[in-house]
DNA sequence: ATTTATTTTTAGATTTGTCTAAATTTTATT
DNA sequence: AATAAAATTTAGACAAATCTAAAAATAAAT
C-alpha cells in the first residue's frame, strides 16, 4: 500500500523476525541456511519460509538461490544487528532499571526490539551508560552495527583441572537461566573442571565452593575463558 | 488462526487503536459515536470502520446498532484505559529519564503502548515513582483503570482579569507543543487574561511577565484552573 | 411529504503472512 | 545408476485489515 505519513517503516515486524533468525543461523553455520532450519527455529512451515525469503531477497536483505538455501547480505546483517542491539539494550534496561530477573526478560524484549526510533535507542543506550554486554553476557552492537562476538569456547571444551570464568550464555532459554539461578551461578563466576565423565559426557565442576554436574547440553551452552 | 504458545494477545494492535480512538470520542461526546467520526480521527475509510466495529462488538468491547453509531462497553473502557495508562507512563519515562522534549514523545509512545506485559508496566510505574500526570498534564490511570479527568475548562473559558494555572493540554499535537515551547510556556505556569477580543475570538494573556495573544483554537486546547 | 444530500453499509478486490497438499528437486541408499 | 527418502517449491486457500464503488438507510431541505 502507500506508506506516506505514518508507518514509514520499511521492514515489517515479521520481516524483522526472519532477518534476525536467518542472521543468527548463518552466523553459526557460516554457509547458506536451509529453508527447513529457518522453519524450525521460527516454528512455522517451510512453505511460508520460501515465500518470505523470496521477498526479503528481492528487498536485498538476503541472497537466495532456489533449492540452495539463503545467506544474509551486508544490508541484512546490518538490519539484524540493529534489531539485536535493540533487543539487548532493552534487556539490560529491564534487569538494571526495572529489576526483572534474567529469565523473564527475553519475551518482553522480543516485543521491544521492534520499536522503531533510532533516537530512542541511542538515548536509551546513553541512559544505561553504554553497556557492552546484556544480562546473559551477550555483546551489544554499537550504533554502527559493530560487535565482537564471544569465542565459541564453552565449559564442554575445558580440559580436566582447568579453571575458567563464565562470560556468557549461548541461549536465552528461561529453563537454563532458572537452573543456573537455583545454583547461584552468575556471569563472571569462576569455575574449575573436576572431571569430564566419559559415560554420559557430563562435566563435574566446582563453583562458588560447591560441586555440580553439568550435562553435555548445559556445558555446551556456557561460554567461558580460561584463567592462568 | 490458532493462538497457542506465542502471541496469546487477545486484541490485535489495530483493534487496540480502534478501542482507544472510540473511547476518546465517546468520552467527549458522551453518546454513540458515528462511523464517519471514527474514520476521520483514524484517517481510514468509513467502510473499514464498519467492519471493525462489528468485530469489536462481537468481542464485547463495543455496543453497536446498525446506522446508530457505537458506544463503548465497560470491558472496552477498561481496555482503553489500560492502553492510555501505558501510553502516558511511557511518555513520562521518555521525558523524565531519556530527556526527550514533550513534542517528540507522542509517536514513540504510540508504539510502546502496545507492548503486552502487565508486569512491565507496573514495574515501570514504580520505577517512575507513580506519576499522576504525563508530560502534557494528562492524568495517568492506575492499574485498575481509575482516572480523574480534567475539568473541561480552558483558557478560552476564562473571563477578563481572571488568573489561572495551566493544568494540561487537550491535544498532544506537536505544533502546539512547539508553539508553547517558543514562548517558554510550561505546565503549572500562571497566566492572567488581559482581554478577550470579540473580533477574532483571540485571548490576550500575560504569562511569565510577557504578553501573548492566543487564538481561539490554542486557547481552547489549554486546560486551566482559576486561582484566588 | 417529497426530494436531495449525507451517512452508513454491503459487496467484491487487494495485500500480508500464513497454511495444506501436491509437485519438483536434491540427497541418500541400496 | 536406479530408486527411495528428504527437502524445497508451487499452487491454491484463508484470515486480517484495508480499499473502491455501489446500494441502502437516515437526515436535511425544499
Image: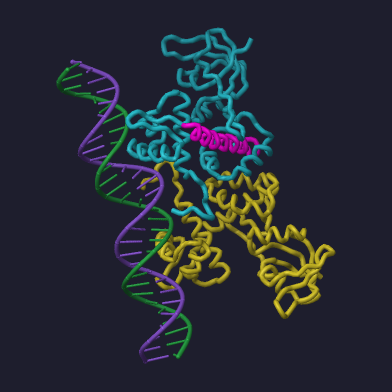
Chain colours: A cyan, B yellow, C purple, D green
Q: Is residue A70 left or right of residue A123?
A: left
- At 56% from the left and 45% from the top, the residue drawn is A116
Closest to the observer, B184 or B58: B184
Residue A212 higher or lower than B172, as above or below: above
- At 47% from the left and 45% from the top, the residue drawn is A12
Give the x, y percent position of residue B211. Answer: 81, 67
Q: Quadrant of residue A94?
A: top right
Q: How many marks?
A: 0
Residue B160 higher or lower than B179, as above or below: below
Closest to the observer, A160 or B12: B12
Q: Quadrant of the C terminus of chain B?
A: bottom right
Is A198 part of what is drawn in magenta?
no
Q: Which residues are magenta?
A: A73-99
Taking the view exactly as shown, the residue that stands out farthest to the top is: A161
Residue A120 higher or lower than B183, as above or below: above
Give the x, y percent position of residue A180. Answer: 54, 25
Give the x, y percent position of residue D11. Answer: 25, 44
Q: Is residue A130 left or right of residue B43?
A: right
Asked whether residue A2 appears in the rendered view, the answer is yes
Is A88 part of what is drawn in magenta?
yes
Instruction: Name the dominant secondary structure of the magenta segment.
Output: helix
Q: Is residue A7 left or right of residue B188?
A: left
- At 54% from the left and 10% from the top, the residue drawn is A194
Asked whether residue B57 appears in the rendered view, the answer is no
Residue B124 higher or lower than B192, as above or below: above
- At 43% from the left and 60% from the top, the residue drawn is B56
Amino acid at each position: 500500500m502507500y506508506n506516506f505519513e505514518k508507518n514509514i517503516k520499511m521492514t515489517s515486524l515479521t520481516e524483522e523476525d526472519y532477518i534476525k533468525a536467518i542472521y543468527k543461523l548463518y552466523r553459526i553455520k557460516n554457509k547458506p541456511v536451509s529453508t527447513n532450519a529457518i522453519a524450525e527455529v521460527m516454528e512455522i512451515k517451510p512453505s511460508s519460509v520460501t515465500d518470505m525469503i523470496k521477498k526479503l531477497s528481492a528487498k536485498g536483505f538476503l541472497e537466495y538461490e532456489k533449492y540452495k538455501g539463503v545467506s544474509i547480505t551486508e544490508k541484512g546483517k546490518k538490519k539484524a544487528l540493529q534489531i539485536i542491539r535493540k533487543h539487548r539494550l532493552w534487556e539490560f534496561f529491564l534487569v538494571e532499571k526495572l529489576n526483572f530477573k534474567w529469565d523473564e526478560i527475553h519475551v518482553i524484549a522480543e516485543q521491544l526490539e521492534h520499536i522503531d526510533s533510532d533516537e530512542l535507542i541511542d538515548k536509551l543506550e546513553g541512559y544505561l551508560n553504554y553497556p557492552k554486554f546484556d544480562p546473559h553476557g551477550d555483546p551489544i552492537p554499537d550504533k554502527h552495527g559493530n560487535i565482537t562476538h564471544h569465542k565459541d569456547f564453552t565449559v564442554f571444551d575445558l580440559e580436566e583441572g582447568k579453571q575458567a570464568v563464565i562470560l556468557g550464555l549461548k541461549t536465552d532459554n528461561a529453563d537454563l537461566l532458572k537452573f543456573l539461578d537455583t545454583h547461584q551461578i552468575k556471569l563472571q563466576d569462576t569455575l574449575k573442571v573436576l572431571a569430564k565423565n566419559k559415560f554420559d559426557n557430563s562435566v563435574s565442576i566446582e563453583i562458588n565452593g560447591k560441586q555440580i554436574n553439568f550435562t553435555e547440553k548445559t556445558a555446551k551452552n556456557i561460554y567461558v575463558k580460561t584463567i592462568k
